Image (cartoon, rainbow, N blue to C red):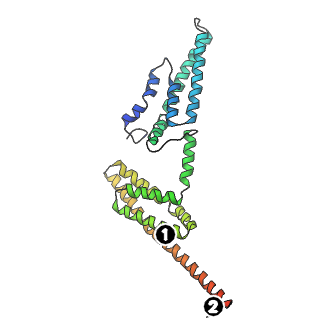
């Protein structure tokens, strides 16, 4: 486990080698080029724009050095101060975005990256999408954890929850969407259990936490079964009442004999 990702620390340092090289290399300044390269690899537009701005600033500073060369004037002093400030700000930005950069690179190994406006904007979009659970995404997540989690007891209960949800979804899609609101937390509990398994730690704390999460899942499975059973029962009662009304209507119209 690294500092910012699930990859090794060696991998992280390898990806940031140009950041460290930029810090060590005071002359010439390469931080705009490093940021441009990172923006291209991670596909973050705001970093790309910022890299171009920094590059133009460096061109301006180089011209200023050329213009004031040969004389120690206030202009040259201001240029030197600007160069130092640019070096500090540029490399400071590289360090500040290194965690997000590493996480984007790690994500690129799982799926193809698309250009995003900024990291903060992307997180807001992901948060909004995470809050909108759909029947398909719910089942997909449950099947992923059923396949990934090693606990056979939990696998059985996950399969049971999926079967009950499919049964409800086939009968009433609107009730299935309400089901997600009531029982969507099941996914979060499974995620926590999966994360604990991935740590591969077998100490007392992790074992106790896993046992608690397993107990929650077992209780949730029973609650979901009762919930779906009641919904189906009420649905059958509604159908029965509707059938009685229909038969009575036919009798009233003398279309059906008593």
Q: Toward which corner of the image does residue 250 lie, by quadrant? A: bottom right
- Of all residues, the one furthest to the top in this rendering is 70
- The x, y position of residue 199, in whole percent, is 35, 48
Q: Which mark is residue 167?
A: 1
Q: Nearer the viewer, residue 172 or 91?
A: 172
Q: Which residue is most to the front? A: 255
Q: Are marks 2 and 1 in contact (CB under 8 Å)?
A: no
Q: Position of residue 246 (x, y in %)?
A: 63, 84
Quadrant occupied by the C terminus: bottom right
Residue 1 screen position, x and y as percent: 37, 41
- The answer to whether residue 3 is above or below residue 195 is above
Residue under label 2, please give it: 256
At mark 2, the secondary structure is loop
Q: Residue at x 49, y 38 (%)?
A: 100
Residue located farthest toward the right when viewing the structure as drawn: 253
In screen coordinates, is 115 left or right of 163?
Answer: right
- Residue in view at x 60 percent, y 85 percent: 244
> Which residue occupies 55% across, 33% down?
47
For label 2, count other residues whose C-alpha is less than 10 Å away and answer few (under 14), some (14-19) or many (20+): few
Q: Quick check: 195 above or below 75?
A: below
As rendered, which of 73 and 19 lies closer to the eye? Answer: 19
Closest to the observer: 74 or 156?
156
Q: Secondary structure at mark 1?
A: helix
Dot 1 crowding, Cα within 10 Å, few <14, some 14–19, many 20+: some
């Amino acid at each position: 486990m690294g500092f910012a990702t699930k990859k090794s620390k060696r991998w992280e340092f390898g990806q940031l080698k140009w950041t460290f090289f930029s810090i060590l290399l005071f002359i010439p300044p390469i931080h705009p080029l490093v940021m441009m390269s990172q923006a291209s690899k991670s596909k973050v537009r705001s970093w790309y724009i910022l890299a171009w701005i920094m590059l133009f600033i460096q061109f301006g500073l180089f011209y200023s050095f050329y213009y004031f060369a040969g004389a120690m004037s206030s202009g040259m002093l201001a240029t030197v101060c600007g160069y130092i400030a640019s070096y500090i700000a540029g490399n400071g930005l590289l360090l500040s975005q290194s965690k997000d950069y590493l996480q984007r690179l790690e994500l690129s190994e799982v799926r193809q990256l698309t250009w995003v406006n900024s990291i903060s904007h992307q997180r807001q979009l992901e948060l909004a999408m995470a809050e909108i659970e759909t029947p398909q995404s719910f089942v997909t997540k449950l099947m992923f954890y059923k396949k990934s989690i090693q606990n056979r007891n939990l696998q059985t209960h996950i399969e049971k929850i999926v079967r009950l949800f499919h049964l409800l979804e086939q009968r009433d899609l609107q009730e299935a969407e309400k089901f997600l609101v009531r029982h969507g937390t099941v996914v979060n509990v499974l995620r926590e259990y999966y994360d604990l398994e991935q740590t591969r730690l077998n100490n007392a704390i992790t074992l106790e936490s896993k046992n608690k999460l397993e107990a929650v899942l077992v209780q949730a499975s029973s609650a979901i079964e009762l919930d779906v059973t009641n919904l189906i029962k009420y649905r059958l009662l509604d159908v029965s009442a509707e059938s009685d009304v229909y038969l009575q209507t036919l009798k009233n119209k003398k279309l059906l004999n008593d």
